Image (cartoon, rainbow, N blue to C red):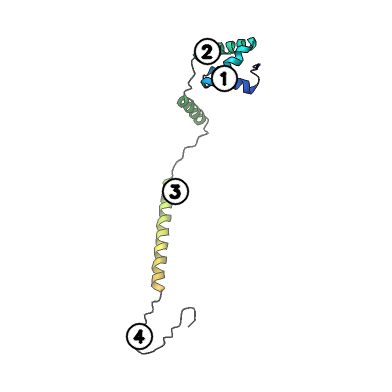
Amino acid sequence: MTMKLNINIAKHSKLIARYLANEMSSAEHTEFEKRVNIDKENEQLIANMKKDWEQVGSLPQHQPNVNKAWNNLYNKLESEELITQAIKSSRFVWTKIAATIALLIIAGSLLFMSNFWSTKVVVESAGQDATLVHALPDGSI
């Protein structure tokens, strides 16, 4: 079965790329070469692409300096006064401390007052059948 390879077809491009990158299994590799060798145009296409692939692989890869790029961006933003410095005001810090202290005092007072105003009723029986009647703060008996 002849297969006319066309690099404009995504499926063919992926197949050729897998072949050139040696990402095919040995069975796939053998089958692909059989199909390529059936057609002279396919052989020529693969030979040209293999040559291009090897040339591209030998080119040095550019490694960008990320830290330098970030520093350049920071310097530019800073020179244009687009970066504001966070200045902590001592007044703001003292306000937070005072608010915390006030909150603790209020919480402590509420806790103390709830214990102070609560009524404890102790009922002791002298051994006699007696009924205790006590009026509750809401007026119920």
Q: Position of residue 82 (x, y in %)?
A: 53, 33
Q: Looking at the image, tell me whether mark 3 or mark 2 is earlier in sequence order.
A: 2
Crowdedness of circle 3 by 10 Å Cα count: few (<14), some, many (20+)?
Answer: few
**Rendered residue at 60%/14% (across/down):** 36
Residue drawn at the location 46% of the way across and 23% of the way down? 65
Residue toward you, 66 or 57: 57
* Up-down relation of residue 130 to residue 17 (above or below): below
Give the label, 3 or 1, closer to the camera. 1
Mark 3 vs 2: CB contact within 8 A: no
Look at the numbered disc 4 and give the secondary structure of its residue.
loop
Q: CA distance from mark 2 to mark 1?
A: 12 Å
Is residue 45 visible to us here?
no
Q: For the residue labelled by badge 1, is the local secondary structure a helix, a strand or a loop?
A: helix
Residue 9, above or below 106: above
Amino acid tagged 2: Glu
Residue 34, given in percent of the width and then of the height, sits at: 59, 15
Q: Position of residue 138 (x, y in %)?
A: 49, 78
Closer to us: 14 or 102: 14
Name the foreground residue: 27 vs 133.
27
Q: Name which of mark 2 and mark 4 comes first in the sequence.
A: 2
CA gap between label 4 and label 3 equals 61 Å
Residue indicated by mark 2: 54
Distance from Cα at disc 3 to Cα at disc 2? 65 Å
Which three-letter amino acid code belongs to the residue tagged 4?
Ser
Q: Amino acid at mark 3?
A: Phe
Labels 3, 2: front one? 2
Q: Amino acid at mark 1?
A: Ala
- Residue tagged 4: 125
| Label 4 or label 3, whichever comes before in sequence order | 3
Give the residue pinned by disc 3: 92
Q: Which residue is mark 1?
A: 17
Residue 139: numbered disc = none
